[in-house]
Amino acid sequence: MIDYVQILNLARDNHWDEAHRLVQPHSDRLSCQIHAYLHRVEGDDWNADYWYAKAGVPRLANSLEQELARLYTLVRSGDD
């Protein structure tokens, strides 16, 4: 089972490598969105766009803080 909250908390707390390591093996829609967010944090927009496309969602013109909040909302709602 994927612990999305743990991954998001790691990302929030600037533990990018650990968050990336945990999400990288997964290809479900929410994992792909989190993976995309992590690449946005890294400044790798091309890779972020790849993961958003894999999730079937566009990259929004929002801040990193707004995107993290959106992802937490998706996790809490159980909607991806």
Image (cartoon, rainbow, N blue to C red):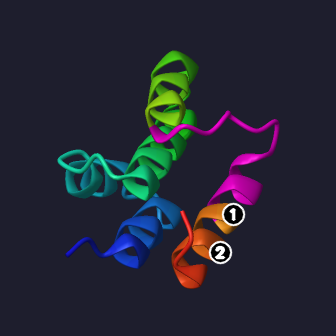
At horizontal 52% and vertical 78% (from top left) the residue drawn is 78
Magenta stretch: includes residue 65: yes
- Classify mark 1: residues with Cα within 10 Å, few (<14), some (14-19) or many (20+): few
**Callout 2 amino acid:** Thr
Q: Are marks 2 and 1 in contact (CB under 8 Å)?
A: yes
Residue sticking out furthest to the right: 61
At horizontal 19% and vertical 76% (from top left) the residue drawn is 1
At horizontal 32% and vertical 57% (from top left) the residue drawn is 19
Identify the residue position indicated by label 1 in the image. 70
Left or right side of 58 for 15:
left
Q: Which residue is more in the foreground, 21 or 50?
A: 50
Above or below, 49 against 20 in this view is above
Q: Residue 74 appears at what percent x and percent y? A: 59, 70
Q: Which quadrant is home to the C terminus?
A: bottom right
Q: Residue 77 appears at what percent x and percent y? A: 60, 81
How far, Cα to Cα, is label 2 from label 1? 5 Å
The magenta region covers 55-68
